[in-house]
Image (cartoon, helix red, strand yellow):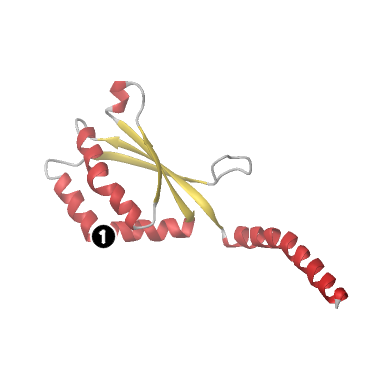
């Protein structure tokens, strides 16, 4: 009986040491893994306050509703640039999850209503830049 328990213990330890490597290999083959999206918004002239209000009052809640993890929002330290640009970062379990979340967000009637109402006096954004990033193995945020 002791030999059976020893064998089970050895197999358990071996499985635990192999599992992370196998999981990482599967993750890489599927192209999955947590990704971050950094987005830069270039506000239309005089519309930055309205853009901040839309994020504050509507967009952030809808991001959460659709599984988008908010990492943070920033503006440049130079006041003139802060009136023109805003940067934010979202996190997703995978690029595929990001694509699905963005599609659900764009299709959400609550978003479409908020966007339409916020742009009744003109568009708020002239340009959006987006890039998806994955963490390095030494990154403190993954």
Left or right of 24? Residue 14 is right
- Locate the N terminus and report the quarter of the image it occupies: bottom right
Q: Residue at x 17, y 45 (%)?
A: 118
In the picture of the structure, the residue carrying the numbered disc 1 is: 108
Q: Is residue 46 left or right of residue 133?
A: left
Quadrant of res 7: bottom right
Q: Residue furthest right?
A: 3
Q: Residue at 21% of width from left, 33% of height from top?
A: 49
Image quadrant where residue 46 sits: top left
- How far across and down, in percent of the image, does residue 127 sit? 31, 39
Q: Tell me the residue at 43%/55% (across/down).
A: 98
Callout 1: helix, strand or loop?
Answer: loop
* Place of residue 125 in the rendered image (x, y in percent of width and height, measured from the top left): 25, 40
Which quadrant would residue 141 be assigned to in this image? top right
Tell me how many marks there are.
Answer: 1
Q: Nearer the viewer, residue 135 or 45?
A: 135
- Most extreme residue toward the left is 121
Q: Residue at x 68, y 58 (%)?
A: 20
Residue 138 on image: x %, y %:
63, 40
Above or below 34: residue 140: above
- The vertical placement of 93 against 7, above or below, is above
């Amino acid at each position: 009986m002791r030999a059976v328990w020893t064998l089970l213990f050895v197999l358990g330890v071996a499985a635990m040491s192999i599992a992370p490597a196998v999981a990482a290999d599967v993750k890489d083959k599927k192209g999955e893994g947590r990704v971050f999206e950094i987005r830069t918004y270039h506000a239309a002239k005089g519309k930055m306050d309205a853009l901040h209000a839309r994020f504050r009052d509507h967009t952030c809640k809808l991001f959460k509703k659709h599984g988008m993890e908010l990492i943070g929002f920033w503006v440049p330290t130079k006041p003139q640039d802060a009136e023109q640009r805003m940067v934010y970062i979202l996190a997703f379990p995978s690029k595929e999850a990001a694509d699905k979340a963005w599609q659900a967000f764009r299709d959400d009637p609550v978003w479409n209503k908020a966007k339409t109402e916020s742009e009744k006096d003109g568009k708020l954004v002239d340009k959006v830049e987006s890039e998806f990033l994955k963490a390095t193995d030494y990154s403190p945020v993954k």
